[in-house]
Image: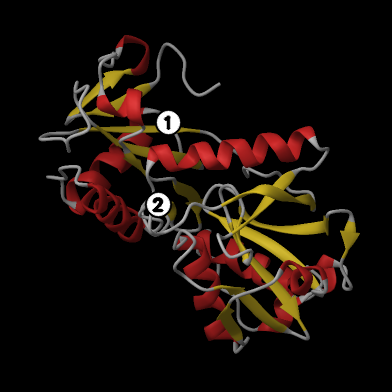
Amino acid sequence: MYYNEETILYLDGKFVKAADSKMNFYSQSLHYGYSAFEGIRSYKTANGTKIFKQEEHYDRLRISCEAVGIPYPWTNEELILASYELLQKNNLEDAYIRPLVFCPPNMSLQKAVSSNILLAAWEWGAYLGDKLLRVGLSSFQRPNPKGFKIHAKIGGHYVNSIMACQEAKDNGFDEALLTDMNGYVAEGPGANVFYEKEGKLFTPCLGNILAGITRATVIEICEEWGIEVTEKQITVEELKDADTVFYCGTAAEIIGWESLDGIGFKIPFNNSVSRKIQLAYKNRVLELEVEDKKSLVGV
């Protein structure tokens, strides 16, 4: 699904075949989840193949490594160049790029003294599909930020996401919604959440969630279009009373919700401000010009 006999990876400064690559089974990352990663998208835009928010993603990868003591000797420039070459070698334009920083053999819990980097890329559609989501409130909460570096995108953190996602699927939902340690709305297993009320947007404040790059892009779009956005603590009851809700993330892009715990929303997603933002986001990643908000209505 992700690679074949011809797929090329970038591994520690060299381009190698995925089928021939190996990893040490005593890696601290394999045993303890001590790794950092990113999810980045490239698009076939009006101006050629472009990696969206490349600097921001590699900045966050460095910040994640620094947060947990993983050595990070690479520069954005060299990794961005490697990413474009990786796309070219695999004949990819619309693609998902996965940088992964992992640690060498070490069975102790001490921080790593060196690290390795992998870049992989493959064709991948929108992670959550393109249909409105039936979301279920998870019994799992996001980890306490006093116990984890929540702002860092660390491999071991995602066991929490896997459990929430599995539970949602087992209960007949498309995706889960997690709360924070205080019971306020946090995020999805792999996406940030916004809700719309009377033409305004609301989203959980930072501190208990991942600072999503797509989340930041949504806020940028709203500022440009004059749409008010408030970052605040949000109760589940408040979310159920929303006009409409959507998830956003690099893998998911922007995807609306159909319901939360079987409860629908007041405005059809296609008639909402959120739908306009979804369209504006797509235009942005494809580098298409939009003259005004009216050009997005009803598209």
Describe residue 141's horizontal placement relative to residue 50 as left or right.
right
Describe residue 108's horizontal placement relative to residue 58 as left or right.
left
What residue sits 16% from the left and 45% below the top? Answer: 72
Q: Where is residue 209 in the image (x, y as percent from the top left)?
A: 49, 61
Decide: is 188 above or below 219: above
Q: Position of residue 230 (x, y in %)?
A: 58, 83
Decide: is 16 above or below 37: above
Q: Which numbered disc flags the more N-terminal residue, 2 or 1? A: 2
Mark 2 vs mark 1, foreground winner is 2
Decide: is 65 above or below 18: below
Describe residue 113's horizontal placement relative to residue 106 as left or right.
left
**Viewport quadrant of the N terminus:** top right
What residue sits 38% from the left and 52% below the top? Answer: 147
**122 or 260, which is in the foreground?**
260
Disc 1 residue type (three-letter): Asn
Hey, which quadrant is residue 234 in on the image? Answer: bottom right
Q: Where is residue 136 in the image (x, y as percent from the top left)?
A: 77, 50
What residue sits 53% from the left and 84% below the top? Answer: 224
User: Which element type, helix, strand or loop, lies under badge 2?
Assistant: strand
Compute the Cα span from label 2 to label 1. 14 Å
Disc 2 residue type (three-letter): Ile
**130 or 48, which is in the foreground?**
130
**Viewport quadrant of the C terminus:** bottom right
Identify the disc placed on residue 51. Answer: 2
User: Which element type, helix, strand or loop, lies under badge 1?
Assistant: loop
What residue sits 20% from the left and 42% below the top? Answer: 70
Q: Where is residue 82 in the image (x, y as percent from the top left)?
A: 25, 40
Q: Name the residue under label 1.
A: 91
Hey, which quadrant is residue 29 in on the image? Answer: top left
